Image (spheres, helix red, strand yellow):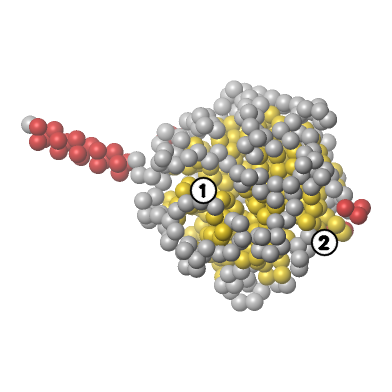
C-alpha cells in the first residue's frame, strides 16, 4: 500500500512539474484559461489600434499603452488599458470598461511609452503633434494618471497632469519622444530626437531629465535638456534606454552609415554628458554585416544591464532583403568593448526569420527576450530565454515559446515583455481582421526566483 502511495505521489509530482513547465502558457490568465487575451479600444467608427508599450506591477496587473485613431480619422489618441492578474479588463479602471483614451490634448498624442513612477502612478509619454501627423510641429509630452486612470497633476511649475517640452533647433520644430525611463528616485528620462534642419535631413539625439514632480532637473546638462550629435552620421534612431544604479543613462538604437545601419549604444554620465570612457567618445557601433552591401541593416531594439555590470543589446541583423536574424550582444558597460565570453565572440545569432524586439536580463547568465518570428509568412510572438551560449532548454520547448492568437490574418507582432512574480507577460499587436488591429497579451509560467521586471 505504501509503495502504491509513493508511486502515485511520484506520478502526480511528475505530472505537476510537466504541467508547470517554465515558459508554458499560464492557464490562470486570459480568456477560457488560454493564457491569452485580445482587446481593442476601438474609438467610435475606427478599429485601428497600435500597441506600443507595457508595464506591470507587483500584484500582477498589466497596463498597456497604444495609439488609437479617433472617429474623424485625423487625430491619434493615447490609449491605456488595465488588465487584472487574471488577464481580464479591470472595470475599476477608467470609465468602467478598463480603458482610457486621451481626449483633452490639443492636436494628436503620438504615444510611445509608459512607466510607473516611484509611488506607482502611471506616466504616459510621447509627442504632441500639431497639424499633419507626419510633418506637423512635435513636442515631447508626458502625462500622469493614477492606477484608476484618473489624471494626476504634476507639481509646480506644470500644475497640470500633462507637461510638454520642446527644443525647436534652428527654427525646426519636430521633436519626437521615443523612450521613457524612470529612476528609483522618481526622476524621469525622456529620450528621442530633435530635428535640426527641415525634412529631418539632420537631427540630434535629444534627452530630457525631469524631477519626480515634473520640473526640469538642472543637475542634468545645466537646464535639464541635452542634445548630442553623432560623430559621423545624422541619421539614427534611439529605440530603448536603461538607467544604471549610479544614474548613468545607456541608449540603444542604430546609426545609418551609407546604405547600411549599425547597431548603436550611447552612454551619458549622471550629469548629462557623453562618457568618453565608453567607446572613446560616448558612442559605440556594432556591425554584424551578415548580408551583401546594401543588406546590412543591424539595429538594436532593446538594451539592458546585467547585475554584474555588463551591457546587453538585442535586435536584428539583416541577412537578405527579406530575412533577418535576431541577435543578442554583450559588452562591458564601462568601456563598450565586447565580452568575448558571451556566445560566439560576444554575440548570439538566432535562427529563423525575425527581430528581437525586447529583452530582460534575468540574471548575469540568463536573458529573456521577445521576438517577432516569421513562420512561412505567418507572424507570431516568440518568447525565449538564452544562456551565455544559446537557448536555455529549461524554458519552453527548446528554449522558446511561440504564441498564436488564432486569427486567420496570422499577423501577431510582439512589442514588449515584463516579469511579475516570476511570470512573463508579453504584449503586442494582433490583427483580428483585414481592418482591425487589437492588443494581444499573453502570460507564461515562470520561476519566482527571478526578480520582478515591471517594464
Residue carrying label 1: 307
At 85% from the left and 57% from the top, the residue drawn is: 196
Whether residue 441 appears in this view of the structure is: no
The correct choice, above or below, for 67 with respect to 161 in the image is: below
Instruction: Between residue 412 and residue 443, name the one nearer to us.
Output: 443
Q: Where residue 133 appears, x then y in whole percent?
A: 80, 48
**Residue 89's image quarter?**
top right
User: Alpha-carbon neighbours of circle 2 within 10 Å: few (<14), some, or many (≥20)?
Assistant: some
Identify the residue at horizontal 54%, vertical 55% (top origin). 310
Q: Label 2: which residue? A: 202
Q: Is 157 or 390 nearer to us in this picture?
A: 157
Q: Residue at x 82, y 45 (%)?
A: 222
Q: Can I make out residue 247 in this image?
A: yes
Using the image, determine if residue 422 lies above or below residue 279: above
Q: Secondary structure at mark 2?
A: strand
Residue at the image point whose x is 59% and y is 35% from the top: 63
Q: Nearer the viewer, residue 364 or 65?
A: 364
> Which image quarter: residue 254?
bottom right
Label whose residue precedes the other's in the sequence (2 or 1): 2
Q: Is residue 396 left or right of residue 374?
A: left
Q: Which residue appears farthest toward the bottom when viewing the image?
A: 292
Q: Which mark is residue 141?
A: none
Local SS, label 1: loop
Rendered location of residue 153, percent (x, y): 75, 26
Amino acid at each position: 500500500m505504501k509503495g502504491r502511495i509513493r508511486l502515485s505521489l511520484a506520478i502526480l509530482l511528475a505530472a505537476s512539474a510537466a504541467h508547470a513547465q517554465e515558459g508554458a502558457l499560464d492557464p490562470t490568465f486570459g480568456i477560457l484559461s488560454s493564457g491569452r487575451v485580445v482587446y481593442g479600444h476601438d474609438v467610435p467608427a475606427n478599429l485601428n489600434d497600435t500597441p506600443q508599450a507595457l508595464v506591470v506591477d507587483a500584484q500582477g496587473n498589466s497596463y498597456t499603452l497604444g495609439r488609437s485613431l479617433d472617429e474623424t480619422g485625423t487625430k491619434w489618441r493615447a490609449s491605456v488599458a488595465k488588465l487584472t492578474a487574471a488577464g481580464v479588463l479591470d472595470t475599476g479602471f477608467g470609465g468602467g470598461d478598463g480603458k482610457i483614451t486621451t481626449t483633452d490634448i490639443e492636436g494628436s498624442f503620438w504615444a510611445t511609452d509608459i512607466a510607473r513612477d516611484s509611488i506607482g502612478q502611471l506616466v504616459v509619454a510621447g509627442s504632441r503633434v500639431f497639424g499633419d501627423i507626419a510633418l506637423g510641429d512635435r513636442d515631447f509630452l508626458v502625462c500622469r494618471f493614477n492606477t484608476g486612470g484618473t489624471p494626476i497633476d504634476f507639481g509646480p511649475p506644470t500644475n497640470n497632469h500633462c507637461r510638454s517640452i520642446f527644443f525647436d533647433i534652428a527654427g525646426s520644430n519636430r521633436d519626437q519622444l521615443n523612450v521613457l525611463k524612470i529612476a528609483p528616485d522618481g526622476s524621469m528620462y525622456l529620450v528621442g530626437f530633435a530635428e535640426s534642419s527641415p525634412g529631418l535631413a539632420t537631427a540630434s539625439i535629444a534627452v530630457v531629465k525631469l524631477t519626480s514632480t515634473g520640473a526640469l532637473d538642472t543637475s542634468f546638462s545645466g537646464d535639464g535638456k541635452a542634445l548630442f550629435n553623432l560623430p559621423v552620421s545624422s541619421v539614427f534612431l534611439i529605440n530603448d534606454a536603461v538607467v544604471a544604479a549610479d544614474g548613468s543613462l545607456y541608449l540603444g538604437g542604430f546609426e545609418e552609415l551609407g546604405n547600411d545601419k549599425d547597431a548603436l549604444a550611447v552612454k551619458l554620465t549622471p550629469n548629462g554628458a557623453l562618457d568618453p570612457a565608453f567607446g572613446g567618445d560616448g558612442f559605440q557601433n556594432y556591425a554584424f554585416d551578415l548580408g551583401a552591401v546594401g543588406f546590412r541593416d543591424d539595429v538594436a531594439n532593446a538594451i539592458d544591464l546585467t547585475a554584474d555590470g555588463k551591457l546587453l543589446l538585442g535586435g536584428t541583423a539583416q541577412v537578405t532583403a527579406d530575412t533577418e536574424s535576431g541577435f543578442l550582444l554583450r559588452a562591458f558597460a564601462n568601456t563598450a568593448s565586447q565580452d568575448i565570453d558571451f556566445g560566439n565572440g560576444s554575440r548570439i545569432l538566432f535562427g529563423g526569420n525575425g527581430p528581437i524586439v525586447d529583452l530582460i536580463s534575468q540574471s548575469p547568465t540568463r536573458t529573456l527576450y521577445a521576438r517577432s518570428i516569421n513562420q512561412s509568412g505567418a507572424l507570431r510572438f516568440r518568447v525565449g530565454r538564452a544562456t551565455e551560449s544559446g537557448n536555455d532548454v529549461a524554458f519552453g520547448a527548446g528554449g522558446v515559446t511561440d504564441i498564436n492568437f488564432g486569427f486567420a490574418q496570422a499577423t501577431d507582432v510582439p512589442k514588449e515583455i515584463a516579469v511579475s512574480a516570476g511570470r512573463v507577460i508579453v504584449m503586442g499587436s494582433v490583427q483580428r481582421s483585414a481592418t482591425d488591429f487589437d492588443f494581444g497579451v499573453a502570460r507564461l509560467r515562470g520561476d519566482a526566483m527571478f526578480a520582478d521586471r515591471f517594464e
